Amino acid sequence: MFRGSMVALVTPMHTDGSVDFESLSKLVELHIESGTSAIVSMGTTGESATLDEKEHCGVIRRTVEMVNNRIPVIAGTGANSTTEAISLTKCAMEAGADACLLVSPYYNKPTQEGLYLHHKMIADTVPIPQILYNVPGRTAVDMLPETVARLSKISNIIGVKEATGDLSRLPQIRELCGDNFDIYSGDDETGTEFLLQGGNGVISVTNNVVPKAMAEMCEAAMAGDREKAMELNEPLTGLHSNLFVEANPIPVKWALIEMGKIPAGIRLPLTPLSEQYHETVRAAMRKAGAL
C-alpha cells in the first residue's frame, strides 16, 4: 500500500510550545514537491509523547487537510495504554488518515503475548489499516518476528516498521509473513541496504532535512540499482548518524531551524540541541547539500 521514501515528520512549534500550523503546511508542500511518497504525522519524531490527545488528533486532522489526498498520510497512534491507542486510532480514522503506525507500548515492557493482544484489540476495534512499529531502543521491548507473524494474519495489520537496524530481521519477517506483508525500515543508517534487500520503504528522520535526495535514493534502491543507490546515499550518511547525537527529534528540529524551515519551539522534557553538537550537525548538513 505504501512504498519508498516516507517522512517521519517533525511537528513545528512556536517558542511557547504551541503548534505552528503555518510552518507545518509549508513542510507538507515541500515534501509533496520533493517526491516524498507518504507523510507520517504524529509519530514519535513528531513529539507525540508531549502532545495531549486533543492536540495529537488536531495535528493529524490538519495534516490530512493540508495533504488533500495528494500522497498518503499515516498517523502515529501508538501508546502504552491500549485504550488510549484505540482512541487515537479512531480519531485518525475519522480524520481521514490512510493508515496508522502504532509503536509498541513503551515503559511497561509487555510480554510477546501482551504485544499480540494489544495490537489485536486495536485492529479488531478500529478497521483502518495498521502498521506495527518495533523500536526496542525507545520502548524497552522487542517485538519478535514470530509475534509480527501472528499479527500479520489479522487483515488490517498490513506491515511493520522495523527500527532495530538489524538487517537479518528483514528475511526473517518476510519468510514468516509472506510477500503481501509490507516491511519498512525505521533506521536511516541501514535504510539503503534494507531496500536493496527487498524492503518496501524507509520511514525516515533524514527525509525531514533532504526530502528530494532521500526520494531519489529510495527510488534507485527499490529499482535494484545498487551502484546508484549507494552513490546517492553517500552524502547523506552524516545525517543518518548525526541526527541522533542527542535524542530524536532534538537534532533534526535544530537542523530545520538552521535551514529557516521551522521556529525554535520544542517541548519539555526535550531541550534544544546542545551547543557542543552544533558544528557536528552542520557539517553533516553541508555534506548532504542542505546548507
Image (cartoon, helix red, strand yellow):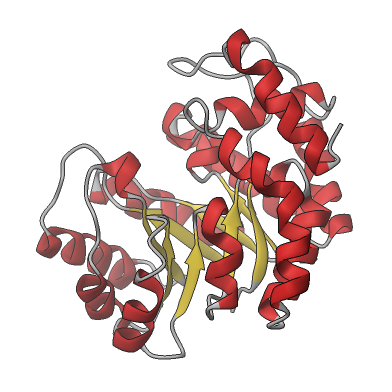
The correct choice, above or below, for 163 with respect to 223 in the image is above
**Up/down of 197 relative to 246, above or below:** below
> Observer-nearest residue: 177 or 214?
214
Q: Position of residue 139 (x, y in %)?
A: 29, 43
Q: Is residue 118 left or right of residue 186?
A: left
Q: Residue at x 53, y 75 (%)?
A: 199
Q: Position of residue 14 (x, y in %)?
A: 70, 17
Above or below, 142 against 217 in this view is above
Query: Is residue 164 toward the left or the right of residue 74 in the image?
Result: left
x and y percentages locating residue 34 in the rendered image: 86, 56
| Residue 215 falls left or right of residue 19 | right
**Residue pictured at 19% horizontal, 66% vertical:** 116
- Expressed as whole percent of the image width and height from the top left, the position of residue 236 reads 71, 48
Q: Quadrant of the C terminus?
A: top right
**Residue at the location (13% across, 59% down)?**
114
Res. 50 image quadrant = top left
Quarter occupied by residue 177? bottom left
Q: Residue at x 71, y 57 (%)?
A: 233
Q: Is residue 99 in sight in this rendering?
A: yes
**Is the N terminus in the top left, top right, bottom left or bottom right quadrant?**
bottom right
The front one of 26 and 64 is 26
Whether residue 226 sits left or right of residue 169 in the image: it is right
* Residue 71 visible in the current orientation: no
The residue nearer to you, when weighing 121 against 78, is: 78
The number of callouts visible is: 0
